Image (cartoon, rainbow, N blue to C red):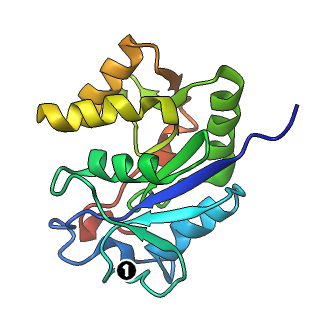
Amino acid sequence: MAKQSFDAVLLAGGKSTRMGTDKAGVLIQGQPLWRRQLATLRALGPDEIFISGRDSGPYAGEGLEILKDLSVERGPLSGLESALVRTKKPYLVVLAIDLPAMRPDFLARLVKVAISRGRSVVPRDGESFEPLAAVYSGAICGLVVERLQSGDYSLQNFIRRAVELDLVLPYPLSPEEQPLFRNVNEPGDLY
């Protein structure tokens, strides 16, 4: 079986209100967060990597395509929309800027499951989903657009609906995998 190709997107378009500064430029172990996250995505070997964020972000000038939201001011769902519209590949790995503990081997497992099962794969921790470190199939793009047009931008509601429609396969997180989703939202979260 031929290797399935996929693209990846780093979601870096948030307002970083609680952090007080652009999260992308925050240092984690001496490295800007955006560089750390790009290294995680590059280790997966995607065909292309995009950044969903502001043209003026600290990653500007890195030589990667920066995607603007097609649906402005609608949160991460609009970043997902722009990346799904842009990619020409059957799968898209999504990683949020504020998940510095995420590892390439975990994302590679999600890619493998997505390709073998032929649909999007989103981690689930109990009753909550973790949609910002996940793999999406292009088949989900229509639902993304529908949710954005409905005015409901909740990622949890979006994923629950996608599961009902059999567009997403939930990936239950093991206790060992749960710490990968520790996010940094404010200065006290930094390590």
Give the crowd class for mark 1: few <14, some 14-19, many >=20 residues within 10 Å.
some
Q: Residue at x 33, y 61 (%)?
A: 184
**116 above or below 164?**
below
Residue shown at 54% from the left, 82% from the top? 63
Q: x and y percent of residue 38 in the render?
A: 56, 68
Callout 1: SS: helix
**Residue 9 in view (yes/no):** yes
**Amino acid found under the numbered disc labelled 1:** Gly
Residue lying at 50% horizontally and 64% vertically, measured from the top left? 50
For the C terminus, give its image quadrant.
bottom left
Residue 111 x/y as whole percent: 65, 38
Residue 181, image x and y in percent? 44, 46
Q: Is residue 173 visible?
A: no
Q: Position of residue 56 (x, y in %)?
A: 31, 83
| Residue occupied by mark 1 | 25
**Residue 60, above or below 1:** below
Quarter of the image holding residue 110? top right
Please name the residue shown 42% across and 71% down the image: 66
Q: Quadrant of the N terminus?
A: top right
Q: Is residue 53 above or below residue 155?
A: below
Q: Residue furthest bottom?
A: 61
39 on left or right of 152: right
Question: Which residue is most to the right?
Answer: 1
Vertical position of residue 126 compared to residue 71: above or below: above
As drawn, is 25 to the left or to the right of 44?
left
